Image (cartoon, coloured by chain):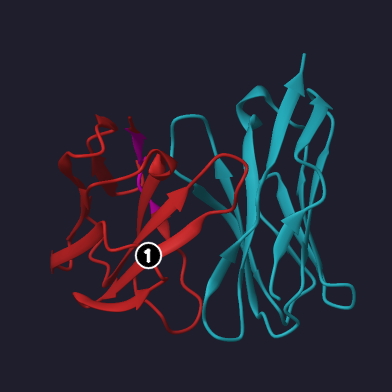
Chain colours: A cyan, B red
Amino acid sequence: GESVGLHLPTLSVQEGDNSIINCAYSNSASDYFIWYKQESGKGPQFIIDIRSNMDKRQGQRVTVLLNKTVKHLSLQIAATQPGDSAVYFCAEWGGDDKIIFGKGTRLHILP
Amino acid sequence: ETGVTQTPRHLVMGMTNKKSLKCEQHLGHNAMYWYKQSAKKPLELMFVYSLEERVENNSVPSRFSPECPNSSHLFLHLHTLQPEDSALYLCASSQDGGTGSNEQFFGPGTRLTVL
């Protein structure tokens, strides 16, 4: 069946280092992917998106990479800051126009 | 602020109570959504409204009853809930709904506890 998942439930990163959060998806027909950030006590917040006709997209301090061959999505955060502490999860739009969310990875920033 | 507000932010209710969750979006969007977020589980889509019509109901129990009186407001009426219904209930809106990919803007959620 369709599934979107993250490889690690928790990731700890030293402040100032780069963070890489991974996501796997199973529906090869998915054509749109989003990364969300959810801070404690808040709803999910859009970070960056990518369409299936692209391999890479950059935002401010964030980069999303899409590898359609292995159905893998990653979020890279450059120079991780304390404010980046949150749960990050990916979402895909499947071929039937349904959005499917992953379980999330909690990012801890170490001082 | 995402332009989507939810009230109340916290709610504790007994299994025999009737309560309602409210969502309001100030973005001029045409689609609104209810999600359930439980610990260590992915977001579960419950209902989708597009232009005030329900376009999706993901096998949600009848003890959850949505209402969309206009494109800016969405309610979730709750009655005779079970303890396993305790979760964070998130509302979202998007420009369009149900067709293709659209960025969804989420509210802060209502933390519901059923005793």
Number of numbered discs visible in the structure rendering: 1
Disc 1 marks a residue whose amino acid type is: Val
Q: Is residue B19 left or right of residue B2?
A: left
For the point 29% across and 33% down, the residue is: B9
Q: Which residues are magenta?
A: B106-113
Residue B111 coordinates in the image, percent (x, y): 36, 35
Q: Quadrant of residue A72?
A: bottom right
Residue B33 coordinates in the image, percent (x, y): 34, 63
Q: Residue B6: within the magenta? A: no
Residue that lies at the very extreme toward the top in this rendered image? A111
Residue that lies at the very extreme toward the right in this rendered image? A70
Work out whether B31 lies above or below B20: below
Crowdedness of circle 1 by 10 Å Cα count: few (<14), some, many (20+)? few
Work out whether A6 lies above or below B10: below
Q: Is residue A11 left or right of residue B35?
A: right
Which is the main secondary structure of the residues drawn in magenta? strand
Label 1, secondary structure: give it: loop
Work out whether B20 lies above or below B28: above
Chain bearing tag 1 is B
Q: Quadrant of residue B31?
A: bottom left
